[in-house]
Image: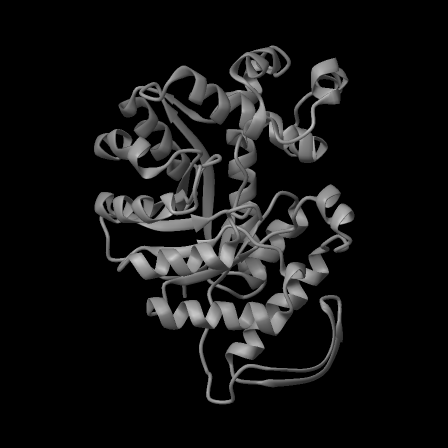
Amino acid sequence: MLPRPDVAHPELGFYTLAGAPETTRALIDEVREAEDLGLGYAFVSERYYKKEAAVQSGAVGAVSEKIAIATGVTNHNTRHPIVTAGFAHTMQSLTGGRFVLGLGRGITRMQDAFGLGRITTAQMEDFAGLMRRLFRGEAIIGHDGPAGKYPVLHLNAGLDEHLPMGISAFGPETLKLGGRAFDQVILHTFFTEETTRRCVDTVKQAAVDAGRDPDDVQVWSCFAVVSDEISEDVRLKKTVGRLATYLQGYGDLMVKTNGWDPAALDAFRADEFVSTFRGALDDVATPDQLAHVATLIPDEWLAPMATGSPAQCAEAVKGQLDMGCDGVIMHGVNPSQLRSVIEAY
């Protein structure tokens, strides 16, 4: 039920506006080059400053012809359900059915600060059910569930479509939810091989347990691809900086999921520079500062990624598919930085 683009590499995707581009308009050239390379999916990442998901999605749809577009991801509690449903159906109409609505749990500290409330597994499942019903043309009356209380929800009585939906997942309960109720599951960057295989198995088994064909649920690896063609300072930002930012936001979850040593996370957090730093390390830290941060992160934590020559990166990408993933999001770089890797692939 997912879009299957008629392109050279439907199993490969990229994230729009990777890193911190100077302007959102950079997305236009990215998408055009991605289609030229034959990539199957453009995943729309969301950071509210210059990277709001609905605007990006519309832009990708407007300047592309074949590539599938997935929010990867947005949070269901930042928009009213009818606004999200309207966004999704407008995207389907704009693109001829190339859109996937991807949801995620979000960062709890940010949600607390914004007064949004923390997202639960039950809320995401309830919300997915609402979207399914709205896309079948239902008028939902008096809904009172984990996703909220709504007197009336209705999109259009003549609507009878399947909305492809994705979810980003860490823990076993969210992975199981993806298997039973979603079409696409996005794993996280810097997952070890053992973690990746376990996550794939959990999703596929949950699909079977729910009476679904496991092949109907695609599991996408989110895999950092940073070849040695990229300058050293930029590589540092996209490797050390990115992992360090995850450790800032949800380090305990990363460590628990991968079975890493929590004492190393404690040491990272206790460092004077890290503990007093304000902002995301991959966004505003200098190369010298990131070089210091690199001394705080165990080498094995940075190992689950593609580095080296374009050919070595291409083989590492294939390795993710060999672990059972249905697709690979080549994370952290834009299509122009991926060209040599794709040619090698």
Whole-percent x, y for residue 108 in the image: 73, 45
Q: How is the image coloured?
A: one colour
Whole-percent x, y for residue 304 in the image: 49, 26
- Asked if residue 7 lies left or right of residue 14, the reply is left
Quarter-of-image position of residue 149 = bottom right
| Count of marks overlaid on the render | 0
- Which sits in the foreground, 116 or 188? 116
Residue 245 vs 25, above or below: the answer is: above
- Asked if residue 338 lies left or right of residue 101, the reply is left
Residue at the spot 65% in from the left edge and 63% down from the top edge: 125
Residue at the spot 65% in from the left edge and 59% down from the top edge: 78
Quadrant containing the N terminus in the rendered view: bottom left
Q: Is residue 171 visible?
A: yes
Q: Is residue 10 visible?
A: no
Residue 243 vs 199, above or below: the answer is: above
- Which sits in the foreground, 120 or 237? 237
Quadrant containing the C terminus in the rendered view: top left
Residue 271 vs 120, above or below: the answer is: above
Residue at the spot 60% in from the left edge and 74% down from the top edge: 82
- Asked if residue 300 lies left or right of residue 220, the reply is right
Quarter-of-image position of residue 335 = top left
Whole-percent x, y for residue 115 in the image: 78, 53
Residue at the spot 67% in from the left edge and 67% down from the top edge: 126
Whole-percent x, y for residue 331 in the image: 44, 36
